[in-house]
Image (tube, rainbow, N blue to C red):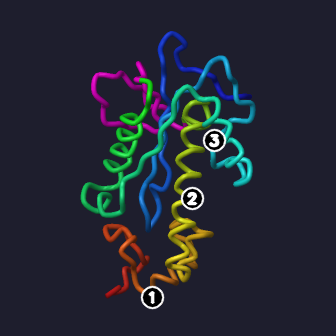
C-alpha cells in the first residue's frame, strides 16, 4: 500500500520530520516540505525503509519537484540547554520559518508538537510511513544530517561518525570510553551505559 499524497487537499500543507533525536553527538536536523500535486514522486517512503543511495536520489527529486522545502537544525549545545524534544520542535519551527511558501496546515511526524504561530497542525504517529510530505521531510532531514556528520567525521575519525552518524553504536561508545567526549557530544545524554567518569 502506497503513502497517501495529502492529509487534506484543500489547504497548502507542509510535512515535517526530524532526524538524529536518539544520537549521542551532533545536531538534530528537521525538514519541512510542501509537495507539488502536479509533480508526483514515485518512490517516496519513510527514510528508514530506504537504502542510502535511494535516499540521496530521492533528495534530488524532492528538491527539484517540491513547491517549497527547507532544512534546519538545533546544535548539541541547544539540545543540552532545552532538551531533545524541545530542540526537535525548534528545528522544525526553523525549517517552517525558511519555507518560501507559507503553509496553511502542518502535518507532523510523531505524537507531540509545539504549535507554530497560528497555523493548524496534526500530529501523526509513524507519519513518515503514511504521508508523502512527511516521508519527503524525513528523507531531507536524514540526508542533510548524514552529510553533516560525515564531514564532522573527517575532524574526529576515531568516533566513526562517517558510519554511525552519532548514534549509540558499540564502536561509538567505545570511542567515547577511550577518547572521552568532544565538543559535539550531547552531555545531558547517557554517553556510556554505566555513565563511567568521562573526564
Residue 11 against residue 17 in the figure, above or below: above
Q: Which residue is mark 1?
A: 179
- Residue pictured at 34% horizontal, 22% vertical: 119
- Mark positioned earlier in the residue sequence (1 or 3): 3
Q: Are marks 1 and 3 in contact (CB under 8 Å)?
A: no
Q: Nearer the viewer, mark 3 or mark 2?
A: 2
Q: State which quarter of the image contains the N terminus.
A: top right
- Residue pictured at 56% horizontal, 44% vertical: 140
Q: Which residue is mark 2?
A: 146
Helix, strand or loop under label 2: helix
- Residue pictured at 33% horizontal, 50% vertical: 87
Helix, strand or loop under label 1: helix
Classify residue 51 as left or right of residue 175: right
Q: Residues within 10 Å of mark 3 (few under 14, many from 20)?
A: many
- Mark positioned earlier in the residue sequence (2 or 1): 2
Q: CA distance from mark 3 to mark 2?
A: 16 Å
Q: Which residues are magenta?
A: 102-126
Outermost residue to the left: 81
**Residue 183 inside the magenta-drawn segment:** no
In the picture, the disc for residue 95 is none
Front-most of residues 46 and 28: 28
Residue 188 against residue 114 in the figure, above or below: below
Front-most of residues 31 and 173: 31
Residue 53 placement (x, y as % from top left)? 73, 53
- Residue pictured at 50% horizontal, 51% vertical: 19
Q: CA distance from mark 1 to mark 3?
A: 35 Å
Q: Which residue is mark 3?
A: 46
- Mark positioned earlier in the residue sequence (3 or 2): 3
Classify residue 70 as left or right of residue 41: left
Helix, strand or loop under label 3: loop
Q: Residues within 10 Å of mark 2 (few under 14, many from 20)?
A: many
Residue 152 placement (x, y as % from top left)? 50, 70
Amino acid at each position: 500500500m502506497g503513502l497517501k499524497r495529502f492529509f487534506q487537499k484543500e489547504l497548502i500543507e507542509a510535512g515535517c520530520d526530524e532526524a538524529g533525536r536518539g544520537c549521542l553527538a551532533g545536531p538534530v536536523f528537521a525538514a519541512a516540505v510542501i509537495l507539488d500535486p502536479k509533480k508526483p514522486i514515485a518512490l517516496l517512503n519513510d527514510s528508514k525503509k530506504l537504502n542510502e543511495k535511494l535516499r540521496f536520489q530521492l533528495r534530488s527529486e524532492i528538491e527539484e519537484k517540491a513547491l517549497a522545502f527547507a532544512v534546519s537544525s538545533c546544535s548539541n549545545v541547544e539540545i543540552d540547554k532545552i532538551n531533545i524534544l524541545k530542540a526537535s520542535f525548534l528545528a522544525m519551527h526553523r525549517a517552517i520559518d525558511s519555507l518560501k511558501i507559507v503553509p496553511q496546515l502542518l502535518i507532523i511526524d510523531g505524537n507531540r508538537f509545539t504549535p507554530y504561530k497560528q497555523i493548524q497542525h496534526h500530529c501523526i504517529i509513524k507519519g513518515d510511513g503514511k504521508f508523502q510530505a512527511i516521508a519527503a521531510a524525513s528523507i531531507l532531514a536524514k540526508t542533510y544530517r548524514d552529510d553533516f556528520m560525515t564531514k564532522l567525521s573527517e575532524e574526529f575519525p576515531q568516533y566513526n561518525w562517517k558510519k554511525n552518524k552519532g548514534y549509540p553504536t558499540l564502536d561509538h561508545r567505545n570511542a567515547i570510553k577511550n577518547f572521552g567526549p568532544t565538543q559535539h557530544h550531547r552531555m545531558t545524554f547517557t554517553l556510556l551505559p554505566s555513565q563511567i567518569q568521562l573526564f
